[in-house]
Amino acid sequence: MAILIRNLFVFFLFTIILGGSYGLWVLEHRLRTVSYSEFRYCLLNHDLVSTTFIGNRVIATHKAGDQYETSVPNPEKLISELQAHNIQIKFKKDRSEQVFQGIALLYVVFLLLTVIISLSRKRKLEEEEKNKFASDKLILPNSDQNQVTFDDVAGIPEALEELQEVVNFLKNPGQYKQIGAVSPKGVLLQGPPGTGKTLLARAIAGEAEVPFYSFSGSDFVEMFVGVGASRVRDIFKEAKTNAPCIIFIDEIDAVGGSRAGGATASGQDERSQTLNALLVEMDGFASSDTIVVLAATNRPDILDSALRRPGRFDRQVNILPPDIKGRKKILSVHGARIALSAEVDLDKVAHMVPGFTGAELANLVNEAALMAARTGKKEVEIKDFEQARDRILMGVERKGMIMTDQDRNVLAYHEAGHAIVAKTLPDADPIHKITIIPRGRALGQTQQLSVNDRSSYNYDYLKARITILMGGRAAEEIAFSQKTTGAQGDIVQATEIATSMVCKWGMSDLIGPQAMAVDDSGFLGGASQRLEMSDTTSEIVDQEIKKLLLECNDEASTILKQQYYLLKQLAAILLEVETIDDEEFEIIMDCHFTDKIAAGIEETHQCQTCPAADLCIHSKLKE
Ligand code: ADP
Ligand code: ZN
């Protein structure tokens, strides 16, 4: 609108100036107007040479050469009189009206033109704005002064390792082609907000030194309404001309969310058109185009399954919140950018903020620096970090989960319980990883690896599995004499397995090889549905399931009571380091899992020989 008003203003100003100067010119050059009587006087005096009639007006040329003008009341009469005087008579059509009309018409045309041009210009500017906004997001690493590399990404080494291959491919596509290896086309980075997915994508581009095209799925819903599909095609076209390169799609769930979402019909349409365009483009580029599409989401659960098909985002990299070692590394990356007092122990800082993501840690460092600056300090001290943490924790509502110390303590015992039971039972899968970092809905996690992908399970294995599941709550009960809600998931799983054992796999002597339930989905049976049966049979089934569960629970309890010292140790170590991998677990077990300790003689343990001395709480206690 502003453009229109401005242009109209300019237009009118122009008219006034033009009109004014024309008026002046006219005033200057206008013929002298004389009265009719004066004209008649000259006529009778034989002073006139010629006359020109323009309608009712006459322009007379005097003998002396000057001209003047007058209005004539009765032109016909005058004409005969002039003829009598032998004065030359000319006639000119009176065009002034037409000229005036012409000018008015022109004026209106110009006015309209101004309006039209202004409006179209406005639209064009808006369009440009939109495009500019969009192309702002197409960032070339060369233009990016602080180029990001893997050095800037800390605390997620597994993800870096997995993505190193993408970097290699972008750097030496020829090598891959020569061997005939199919290039990675699409990689889905999934993890909670703030864990560094965007950072990682940029770092890949930085490492491989290729252009980085980035846009966000939510742009398509908010900004490119109606043109989403064509924007996608544009981006891919542009990317192809600049290959090798990376296309990064943040929040891909905004367009790639499964179509069951609650959006309006038109929004749905827009989304599915955009999504289809994306799929077509991804399917379309040949492996000769060295383009890798990275996408990030924190809602992998709602993604349209079409996105994960081979040739699309067939690789998934999980990016999880960092554990304590990761937090320390991230803190040192960000701490390097501020003036840090030499006394600050980042390890200590990392301990203060369990559950913080990379983004929250970056924020913490920044807040601490602000705190220090506010109080006029030259360097950031540990106190500033403490204040910054309190401010962040109290000020902002945290999206993730922050646990109280007591919660963490209980969780550590719970996970340690699972792990120790698993280690003790000969039929169990080996421990892969134990962690007390909350992720998703599960609080902690004890992951086991199946040694060989088993397709069938025997009785002992299944019982071991239930016993391990019971280990969590058994540990809580032993250590704190209380039950918590944390065991809910374990109990559900354990019950499912026990139900299947009794009802489907004929593993109960009382029931025998008779199907009591059907169906299969999910792990080891999933939700099973009991078949029709008599009340008495139903009762026996229930008793058998219960018996199994109680047996396993008792066994877990017994093991953990025997290994109480070990349980305490492992829980303490978990609280300290938050994540223990398979190797570390073995070391800790070798060191602590001895008969002596099992017998409850704590003091005799020789920590000097423990290869995981820094993990070993015992040595810490001795200090
Ligand atoms: P996401 O895309 O997963 O939501 P971002 O990549 O946008 O998270 O992270 C936001 C900021 O947090 C980054 O710019 C960076 O400063 C910081 N950050 C997050 N994760 C890390 C990490 N692993 N190492 C270093 N900094 C990180
Ligand atoms: Zn558990």
Image (spheres, rainbow, N blue to C red):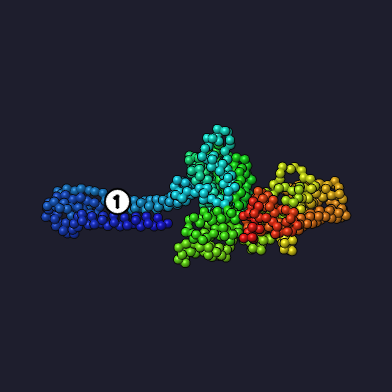
Task: Give the structural element (helix, strand or loop) at label 1.
Answer: helix
Can you say whether 29 is above or below 280 in the image?
below
Q: Quadrant of residue 477?
A: bottom right
> Can see residue 595?
yes
Q: Quadrant of the N terminus?
A: bottom left
Ligand 1 closer than 8 Å to label 1 CB: no
* Position above or below: 299 against 292: below
Residue 528 seen anywhere in this rendered image of the structure: no
Q: Which residue is mark 1?
A: 99
Q: Amino acid at mark 1?
A: Val
Front-most of residues 613 and 95: 613
Q: Nearer the viewer, residue 300 or 25?
A: 300
The quarter of the picture where the C terminus appears is bottom right
Residue found at x 55% / y 51%: 154
Look at 46% across and 64% down and name the residue there: 377
In the picture, residue 17 is in which quadrant?
Answer: bottom left
In percent of width and height, residue 282 lies at 56, 41
Residue at the (55%, 63%) spot, across then down: 389
Q: Position of residue 420 (x, y in %)?
A: 72, 53
Circle 1 packing at 10 Å, graded few (<14), some (14-19), many (20+), is few
Residue 401: horizontal and vertical position, in percent?
A: 62, 59
